Amino acid sequence: MEILKRAWAEVHLDRLRANVENYQNCLGSETGKTQLMCVVKADCYGHGSPACSLYLQEEAGIRWFAVSNLNEALELRESGITGEILILGYTPPEYAGVLSENNIIQAATDLEYAQELSSCADNCAGKPVRVHIKLDTGMSRLGLRFSSPDEYCEQILSIASLENISAEGLFTHLSSADSMDSESVEFTKEQIKLFDSVCNKAQKLCPQLKERHFMNSAGGVFYNSSKATLARLGIIMYGLTPDRELKLPFELHPVMELKAVVSQVKYLEKGASVSYGRTFTAPGRIKTATVAAGYADGVPRLLSNKGEVLIGGKKAPIIGRVCMDQLIADVTGIDVRPGDVAVIIGSDGANTVTADDIAEKCSTIGYEIVCGITKRVPRVYLK
Ligand SMILES: *Cc1c(COP(=O)(O)O)cnc(C)c1O
């Protein structure tokens, strides 16, 4: 564990497993047979892949993984992931051979794309390209989009009958499963109803379409269905909520903590200005700590004069602008020395700052905060 003691992220793998188990129990209460597909795209939402993915495979028994693109899929294969890998996003059809050689499943988003995959796979004379067919039921992003279940079915059957393509599943994505207002609930129910009706028809005509999945984190908690063979678990696995307003039936254990060292402590007299642009002026004599993390590490600049870090178990407000590599906190009344640790995300004593707390201050979602922790921040894995 040779890491530079500057800014680093501690990734608690045991919490990853605790979140997986809580979600699994939530699903299991109705079905008991829906398997988890862990969504490990974007470097496991910034938590670090392959380490987290390997832990999920080796210690949590996960056999299904979802990623956003081919590079992420190949990285998993190279690091020893032997389970199924589904690419949720776009892969240029000329990579058909790479997909089949590495036994990676591709989302097929329309007939034309599937045809291109099929003809590229022909040139490679390899195994067929495995696909799950994506249905757009209301997200208006990727997937087949029609006005009647029969039209969906017709396209699904056309894709399934292509040469060099092995169509093994159907899936869709919910746009509002994490909102509990009645309009969102109605919309989500309509999406699921349409998906069910297409799946019921298509799977009858084409039994090789074995897999069926539509739940994301929120979907699995609030709309879980025994008809789904898989549930795509993302944000909840990392211990963050899909939406701040949402009340979950179990406790979340945030997996990542972001810490940085205090590089200097000093006193400022009344009237002294702090950081770029002099947006903070000391209202009296104050003690400050300079902390070795900034926006180039993923601490949002929007936390300038707004956020707080934890030092010595106490809340220390961020004063002045967050810089690229450093920030300054007011530690008046806190016992602190250079070399002490500041917690930017995580717990210290009785206090906690979560990525969701930071997200709220920055008018965004926790997803963006953890995905934004940059490459120069080493990840330290703890069991
Ligand atoms: C990212 C993603 C998920 C996971 O969503 P969470 O809200 O993090 O659970 C599931 N399905 C698709 C298609 C995605 O892109």
Image (tube, rainbow, N blue to C red):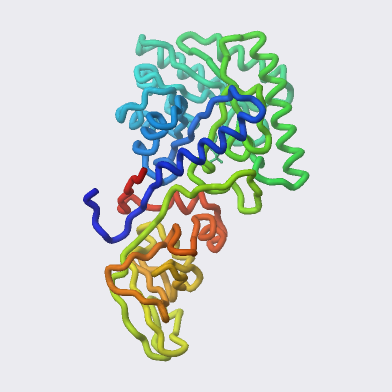
Rendered image quadrant of residue 249: top right
Of residue 346 and residue 135, the one placed in the foreground of this image is: 346
Residue ID at (35%, 17%): 101
Of residue 71 and residue 260, the one placed in the foreground of this image is: 260
Q: Position of residue 64 (x, y in %)?
A: 47, 26
Q: Is residue 310 above or below residue 136?
A: below
Q: Position of residue 281 (x, y in %)?
A: 44, 85
Q: Is 22 positioned to the left or the right of 293 in the image?
A: right
Q: Position of residue 373 (x, y in %)?
A: 40, 53
The answer to whether residue 331 is seen in the rendering is yes
Of residue 294 and residue 262, the one placed in the foreground of this image is: 262
The answer to whether residue 325 is seen in the rendering is no
Q: Is 313 positioned to the left or the right of 203 in the image?
A: left
Q: Position of residue 224 (x, y in %)?
A: 66, 31
Looking at the rendering, the quadrant in which ligand 1 lies is: top right
Residue at the front extreme of this rendering: 349
Q: How many marks?
A: 0
Residue ID at (59%, 26%): 213
Residue ID at (48%, 33%): 38
Q: Is residue 69 above or below residue 279?
A: above
Q: Is 249 positioned to the left or the right of 311 in the image?
A: right
Rendered image quadrant of residue 321: bottom left
Quarter occupied by the C terminus: top left
